[in-house]
Image: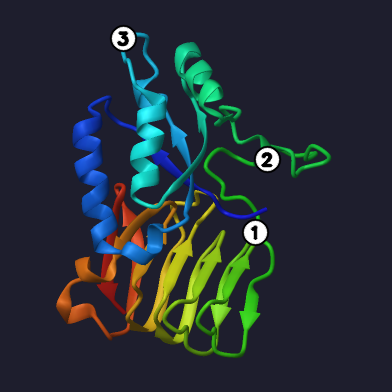
Amino acid sequence: MIPITVLNILSGDLERFAKQLARKVRQAPGLFQGMPVVLDMQSVSAPEHEIDIPRLALLLGDQGLVPIGVRHGNRAQRQMAQDFGLAVLPDSDGGRESRSAQPSSEAAPAGTPAKRAAAKLILQPVRSGQQIYAEGGDLIVLASVSPGAEILADGHIHVYGSLHGRALAGVQGDESARIFCRKLYAELVSVAGIYRVYEDVDADLRGTAAQVFLREQQLITESL
């Protein structure tokens, strides 16, 4: 399994969408080139929303992204996507549900976080071009992460060196996940799919010990 970016479509105004997308791509050009994305149509799935799926896919392609499928669309949107050659994905997270072969004998109380796997420990520097993913748990890097590297975790990320490259915590949707590092230089940080590029980080936090976390769906960066 590999992480896939989900792009939430919030409006049928494709002119506005194109401008917003171009602005985001200009912030981090290398991030989006060749990135596979799934289009989530839940916010625009009502019958009155008419969205030209092929045009939407072409707009993404113009910016270097690769649309591979849609989910949560209405019948017309799903048919349009199929006709254009996109996959129509299940509305629920079937992959995550299918990981449990047997039901638990005791249901966890509501709001209890899922039990995490043991943390993945990396002792060597993460080099440019490397991707390291801690599935089901935290990622601990006892060295630096180089520019052009990518580290991902279902849980928290701890970097006891300089954090360059990209760091994505809570990639399966855990909004309680956090990123901790000794020196923050990351070109992109993300928690549960909400991201921020280096240029948007406060200047007084760059190169310092910092943590990144979500608060009311806003990505917060604070000093440690």
The amino acid pointed to by label 1 is Gly
Circle 2 SS class: helix
Circle 1 SS class: loop
Q: Earlier in the sequence, mark 1 or mark 3?
A: 3
Q: What residue sits 79% from the left and 37% below the top? A: 103
Q: What residue sits 45% from the left and 35% below the top? A: 39
- Could you say which quadrant of the image residue 89 lies in? top right
- Closer to the observer: label 1 or label 3? 3
Q: Position of residue 33 (x, y in %)?
A: 42, 58
Q: Position of residue 15 (x, y in %)?
A: 20, 33
Task: Measure the C-alpha gap from mark 1 to mark 3.
Answer: 40 Å
Q: Which residue is mark 1?
A: 136
Q: Residue furthest right?
A: 102
Placement of 214 over or under 204, stated as above or below: above
Circle 3 SS class: loop
Q: What residue sits 49% from the left and 76% below the top? A: 149
Task: Measure the C-alpha gap from mark 3 to mark 2.
Answer: 31 Å
Q: Nearer the viewer, residue 212 or 187?
A: 187
Q: Earlier in the sequence, mark 3 or mark 2?
A: 3
Task: Measure the C-alpha gap from mark 2 to mark 1.
Answer: 13 Å
Q: Which residue is mark 2?
A: 95
